Image (cartoon, helix red, strand yellow):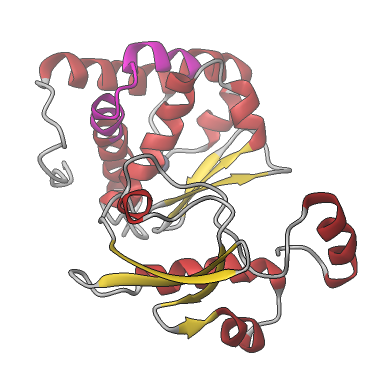
Amino acid sequence: MAYAMQDRPLVRDLTGLGDLPQVIAVAPESPAQVAGIRPGDDILSVNATPVSEIVAKDPEAGSLADHLEELLAATPEGEDITLELERGGHTLTISFRGEQLCATRFILKTGKGVTAYSDGQNVALSAKLVDFAQNADELAVFASHELAHVVARDGKAKGLRERRAMEDRADTLGADLMRCAGYNVERGLEIWHRYNQRDILRWLRDPSHRNIPERVRRIEAHIASTPETCPPPGVPELED
Ligand SMILES: [Zn+2]
């Protein structure tokens, strides 16, 4: 339970949640669902590591979900994940083969401006950005640009030139990813026009990014001239 110790009795009364981590959702037709895991199952152990052991090592409630995710992710490729679960007072053990999908985590950040950023592994979208976006296509423009940075393993640039090349590539690779995920790039780019009107000064101050109309033109030209290949064929080299 990711609640502070003193709030737990109340949360338990209100929601019926116990101290054990619980499955809150199972993706339809996922290996976990096919194997019989159900929402509401309490998790007792992951790959023979008891949850109590994880809690004992790091009592900070909020990080338990992170630790469980790390354990799941550490399962060697080609090996089963085994969960020991509790359902209706019974203990059951379920094994299934995980599927390698998108390893990037998307995080919602409160208290920030209209912004999105990534740290090599996670993509953060601010709550204000989510409000500012008028539809999922618009949000996908920002999310896929950051996802492209993660996919391309963009780290610290050696200089302004390289930074700019990375940003250019994140724009076009992001558009490819977005298109493959079923979003409408053209419609999504509307967010840049509104963003530009709202905050022109910031972009003038930030020389690593081109000005917004120029970026929109590059993305549109890329989409128009590049046939849709899904998944995108790889990470293009940085352009000079
Ligand atoms: Zn960027």
- Location of residue 142 in the rendering, given as x and y in whole percent from the top left corner: 45, 32
Observer-nearest of 195 and 183:
183
- Magenta stretch, main secondary structure, is helix
Q: How many marks?
A: 0
The structure residue drawn at horizontal position 13% and vertical position 45%, both measured from the top left corner, is 234
Decide: is 158 above or below 124: below
Decide: is 105 above or below 93: above
- Location of residue 100 in the rendering, given as x and y in whole percent from the top left corner: 25, 56
Decide: is 150 above or below 196: below
- If the image is split into quadrants, where does the N terminus sit? bottom right
- If the image is split into quadrants, where does the C terminus sit? top left
Observer-nearest of 149 and 31:
31
The structure residue drawn at horizontal position 25% and vertical position 31%, both measured from the top left corner, is 172
- Location of residue 75 in the rendering, given as x and y in whole percent from the top left corner: 31, 73
Q: Is residue 186 inside the magenta stretch?
A: yes
The structure residue drawn at horizontal position 58% and vertical position 14%, both measured from the top left corner, is 197
Quadrant position of ligand 1 = top left
Observer-nearest of 23 and 130:
23
- Location of residue 210 in the rendering, given as x and y in whole percent from the top left corner: 38, 30
Q: Is residue 142 inside the magenta stretch?
A: no
Magenta stretch, residue numbers: 174-191
Decide: is 114 above or below 49: above
